[in-house]
Image (cartoon, rainbow, N blue to C red):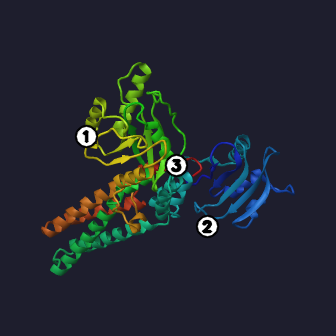
Amino acid sequence: MTDDTIAAISTPIGEGGLAVIRISGAAALAIADRCFVAPAGKAGTLSAAPSHTLHFGHVVRDGEKIDEVLAAVMRAPRTFTREDIVEFTCHGGILPVKLVLDAVLAAGARLAEPGEFTRRAFLNGRIDLAQAEAIADVIHSRTELALRAANEQLAGKLSKRIEEVREQLMQTLAHIEAHIDFPDEDIAPDTKDQLLERMDRGVRFMDRLLATANEGQILRRGVRAAIVGRPNAGKSSLLNQLLGRDRAIVSPIPGTTRDTIEETANVRGLPIVFVDTAGLREAGDQIELEGMRRSRESLERAELILHVLDRSEPLTEADTRHLGELAGRKRIIVRNKADLPARLEASLLPDAPVVDVSCLTGDGIETLKDRIRELVWSGGVGTEMLEVMINSRHQDALNRARAAVVRAIDALRSDESLELVAMDLRIGVNAVGEIVGKTATDDLLDMIFSRFCIGK
């Protein structure tokens, strides 16, 4: 399938000013010539055009003009896929975009699969697998911090570190295998110490990378924070304050929120998915019953809980029960209505961070954002490690690699068979290689690139 010439819409579907249809493959220029006409009425002009040039004309099908376009000609290997690429920029209406794509497909291109352009860039050596994943992270970044981390990975910072540790392990493996080939020569004590130190360095570096996994996943997918409390405590008002806009309906009538509302906010550089839940209470009808079920489900999935209490009222029996039910969870007690006289006794609250806010005036909201960041972000990841934040796939591969290298270290120290040492080292090398695609399987590639959109 990599011999096919593929095409797809590379801009979001819908109405807009402009849209881009991308063609990539050995026949990209020939296919473009069949459906492109220059202003002078000449066809076949793009295949004769210099690389990285822009040309005005029309896309036609069966001799009928569809839309005026700008055609960008980019010749291999100086392209994203390292194949010949032609991109038609046309008007962004739904119909002209569809008809331009149809004309390209009728001229001989095949519709691209999800992520196929990026997959070709990987297969043709333009980028490695970690960089390919970073492209998706750039697209889906929801905060500047997440975008920065994704751009560092796209620039190859993580790949460089991975290649360094892989090279160390491969050199050690080559040394071990050389002694297996010449069994009469024992490994000298100082050489053995050097090999062990090299493997120890690899383990220590993998530990540093693994320490970034939690923060890396937070930047990529965000943290789910459930806003809970009894009716009319101010949950929806708190959501609106955290978002900086009116998203949830606010009413003095208890029980206004009957369903869960999810919105993502940038909190000190972190994407936090706030979930406003129905008030914790006994359900009165089928709608409230379903709302409560969804609230409980959101609570189970939440990684952080913002438990909202009314500071202007004494602690109720229901409040006490709910505080007990949520014991052991990562949470912040938010005492709302700080603009009113306090009647809530602080001594009755559990040992958890407590923040006083007024959702009416906005007082305390910035302090709450600071507490949220402190609670979900360990702060152990410095600026230099932001460049190499790993994702869950990298974490799995590194865990397997680390375990294998530790086994190899133990075996070498115990003077066990060098074949066992080499076997574990080879497992470690292969696991590390999976991160950048040195030892990737087709199933792994299918899994990664299927998450991309068509056209990327």
| Label 3 Cα crowd, 10 Å radius (few <14 / some 14-19 / many 20+) | many
Pointer 3 or 2: first along the chain: 2
| Label 1 Cα crowd, 10 Å radius (few <14 / some 14-19 / many 20+) | few
Q: Secondary structure at mark 1?
A: helix
Q: Is residue 91 visible?
A: yes
Q: Residue at x 37, y 32 (%)?
A: 230
Going by the numbered disc 3, the residue's amino acid type is: Phe
Going by the numbered disc 2, the residue's amino acid type is: Arg
Viewer-side residue, 242 vs 143: 242
Give residue 160's position: percent from left, percent from top.
42, 69
Q: Is residue 381 above or below residue 364?
A: below
Q: Residue at x 25, y 36 (%)?
A: 324
Q: Residue at x 80, y 43 (%)?
A: 62
Q: Is residue 344 above or below residue 366?
A: above
* Location of mark 1 (residue): 348
* Location of mark 3 (residue): 452
Q: CA distance from mark 1 to mark 2?
A: 67 Å
Horizontal side of 239 relative to 165 (left or right) equals right
Q: Secondary structure at mark 2?
A: loop
Horizontal side of 238 relative to 182 (left or right) equals right
* Location of mark 2 (residue): 78
Q: CA distance from mark 1 to mark 3?
A: 50 Å
Marks 1,3: beta carbons within 8 A: no
